[in-house]
Amino acid sequence: MKNIYLSLVLLLTVSNTWSQRGQVIAYIDMEYILENVPEYLEAQNTLDEKVVKWKKQLDKEARFIEVLKTDLANEKAILTKDLIEEKEEEIALKQDELRRLESLYFGPRGDMFNLRKQLVKPIQDQVYNAIQKISARKKYDFVFDKSSDLVMLYSNKKYDISELVLSTIDRTRLVDEKNAKRDAKKAPKVLTEKQKEIIAKKEAIVEKKLSEQEAKKKALAERRAELLKKREEKRELLRKKKEALKKQKEEAKQKKTKKEEQK
């Protein structure tokens, strides 16, 4: 009822002013715009995954506390006063920890707030910047958000600039991407730590392979030299055997000749 009252007052005020000064009004559907921005959907999916993970952690802690409470209720009759107080203190500490964790995840300045700010706010800023550009170009005096708490009792489609905002965002994105590519070509490439690590690993692998190849070449050369040495030794041994055999034959021949001469 309060929103309707505010809407009526605002519309009457704007209508009165418009009739006097000829002011131009437009409106957008922020939900529709954000649902058609790919970066927003990706950011929202990332945020939703985190929220599911956090809720699972909180549910796990809450179930554990319930188990402690059930165990205490079942064992209370056989426990001493000191043990009961000790278990109650443990449960109280776990409950405090659960509340602290809830505040850490979903508090006013918690992880959800910070992650949403980190992921979603830049995209919302794109939308607002696009609205400002369009408003300045078309000289709109007021731009309302149809999806906000402000209730619009009537809206003429011809004043809806949501598609114009989307096209402006797309053009801005294309220009930014083009400029980024141009700057990337001009500027020296800056590697991330992960890229440096990958390159270092690749270089280490290449260096290892080269080292192994060099080791294999060296071992092969040493083996070839050893084989050549053994072959040369065998040839030398064979040559000496041939010379010795030849010498024996010559000596035997000379002895035979002397014997024939003595006869």
Image (tube, helix red, strand yellow):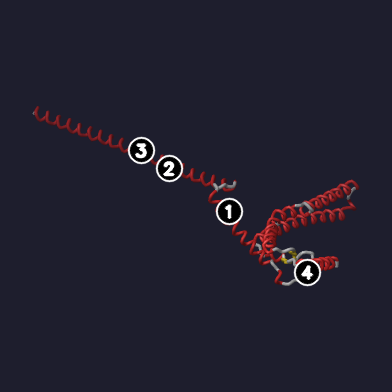
**Residue count near mark 3 (Cα–Cα under 10 Å), binned few <14, some 14–19, many ≥20:** few
What's the residue type where badge 1 is placed? Answer: Ala
Please state which of the two labelled residues, at mark 1 or mark 4, is closer to the viewer.
Answer: 4
Task: Specify which label sits upstream in the sequence, 2 or 3.
Answer: 2
Q: Quadrant of residue 235?
A: top left
* Residue displayed at 79% across by 71% down: 153
**Can you say whether 143 is above or below 188 in the image?**
below
Q: Quadrant of residue 252?
A: top left
**SS at mark 2 in the image:** helix
As drawn, is 180 to the left or to the right of 142? left
Label 2 vs label 3: CA separation? 14 Å
Which secondary structure lies at badge 4? helix
Image side of residue 91 versus residue 44, left or right: right
Q: Which residue is mark 3?
A: 225
Identity of the amino acid at label 2?
Answer: Lys
Foreground mark, 1 or 3, reads 1
Q: Mark 1 highlights which residue?
A: 180
Give the residue number, with chain letter if any, for mark 2: 216
Q: Which residue is mark 4?
A: 19
Of tags 4 and 3, the one toward the viewer is: 4
> Which mark lies nearer to you, 2 or 4?
4
Q: Which mark is residue 10?
A: none
Whole-Å distance between the Cαs marked 4 and 3? 106 Å
